[in-house]
Image (tube, helix red, strand yellow):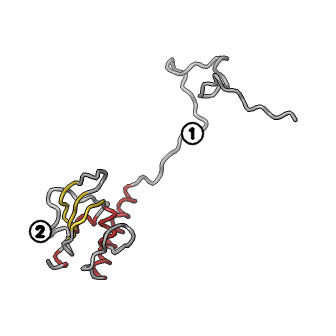
Amino acid sequence: MSSSGAGIGSDDGPSEINIEDNKPLWGYVTKIGKTSEGGGNIAFKCNFCNASYKGSYYRVKAHLLKISGHGIKVCPKISSSQMAELQRKIIDAEQRSKKELPKYIPLPSTHASYPSSSSSIRCDDSTVNKGPFRMEGFEPKKENML
C-alpha cells in the first residue's frame, strides 16, 4: 500500500471504532481488536508499513513519529513531510482540547457564610474548636525534659 493513501479517510482506516478527537493518530492505524493485557491496549496495524503491534495510543504515537524508547519499532515508511503533517494534527488536537477547558474556575470562598436555615449544622460548646477529626485515643507528642 502506498503511504500516501494511509489516513483517516482511507479504506484501511478503522471502520467500527470511533477516532477520538484528541488522539488523531488512531486514524493512521487499523485497530484489530482489544488485547488480553487490559488497560487501553489494543492490537493495531500501521497503515504505512503494514506491521502489526499491540499497545496504547502512546505506542502508536511513538511508532508513527519515530520516537524511540517506547518499546515499539519506529515506522520506516513515513517521510519527513508526512511526519510534519502528523505532528501538526497532534498540535491542532491539543489546541482544541485546551479551548474546550473552562478558562476560569472559581474557588470556594474561605469566608463562607453559613445559612441560618433549620438544615444547618448546630455548633455548641462541645463541638467548637475540635476540628473535623475525632481526637479519641490521640496523645500529643511529649517534650523531653532533660
Q: Which residue is mark 2?
A: 11
The quarter of the picture where residue 142 lies is top right
Q: Position of residue 122 (x, y in %)?
A: 58, 18
* Dot 1: element: loop
The quarter of the picture where residue 126 lies is top right
Earlier sequence position, callout 2 versus callout 1: 2
Residue lying at 21% horizontally and 57% vertically, measured from the top left: 18
Label 2: how many residues lie within 10 Å, few (<14), some (14-19) or many (20+)?
A: few
- 56 w.r.t. 90: above or below: above
Alpha carbon of mark 2 to alpha carbon of mark 1: how far? 55 Å
Front residue of this view, candidates 78 and 89: 78
Q: Which residue is mark 1?
A: 109
The quarter of the picture where residue 46 lies is bottom left
Q: Position of residue 73 (x, y in %)?
A: 30, 72
Quadrant housing the N terminus:
bottom left
- Pick out the residue farthest to the left: 11
Q: Amino acid at mark 2?
A: Asp
Residue lying at 70% horizontally and 27% vertically, measured from the top left: 139
- Pick out the residue farthest to the bottom: 80
Q: Amino acid at mark 1?
A: Ser
Relative to 69, 28 lies left or right: left
**Tag count:** 2
Residue lying at 23% horizontally and 54% vertically, measured from the top left: 35
Quadrant housing the C terminus:
top right
Q: Position of residue 57 (x, y in %)?
A: 31, 61
- 102 w.r.t. 146: above or below: below
